[in-house]
Image: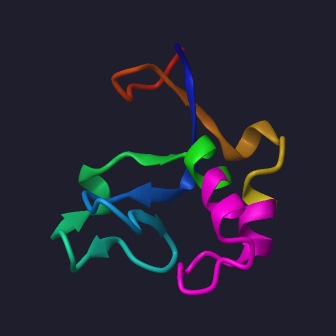
Amino acid sequence: MVTETNPYYWDCECKTDYQHKKTDTLYCVKCNSYEDDQPDSRVNELLALKNICPDCSGTGIPLSWLEHLLSSSPAIVALVDEEGKPDK
């Protein structure tokens, strides 16, 4: 099974509020995670965030960015396998 990820966001180890925009931060002070050690965010989870929080206030992810980055353009997503490795 292939999962689409977005190279502009990363997931930390937190149980909630774990998606971070790479241009905003590369370190999570809550769980002590660094972007280099963590996977890119999954597109389906970013879309779920958009549905849960339509204005994205308090998340650090502006709706305009989310809509732009989650468009159907193949340049903004990467395909990974179940282990999070790039799918060739």
State the residue at coordinates (55%, 50%).
7
Q: Position of residue 59 (x, y in %)?
A: 53, 78
State the residue at coordinates (38%, 29%).
84
Q: Position of residue 81 (x, y in %)?
A: 45, 20
Indicate the colouring scheme.
rainbow
Q: Which quadrant of the figure has residue 30? A: bottom left
State the residue at coordinates (52%, 13%).
1
Q: Which quadrant of the figure has residue 35? A: bottom left
Residue 72 lies in the magenta stretch: no
Residues 24 and 82: in front is 82
Q: Is residue 48 left or right of residue 15?
A: right
Q: Is residue 76 left or right of residue 39?
A: right
Quarter in which the C terminus is drawn: top right
Residues 59 and 70: in front is 59
Q: Which residues are magenta?
A: 48-67
Q: Residue furthest bottom?
A: 58
Residue 64 lies in the magenta stretch: yes
Residues 61 and 36: in front is 61
Q: Position of residue 9 (x, y in %)?
A: 51, 59
Q: Residue furthest front?
A: 52
Residue 63 drawn above or below residue 10: below
Tag count: 0
Residue 63 drawn above or below residue 78: below
Q: Position of residue 75 (x, y in %)?
A: 74, 42
Residue 73 drawn above or below residue 69: above
Q: Is residue 88 left or right of residue 76?
A: left
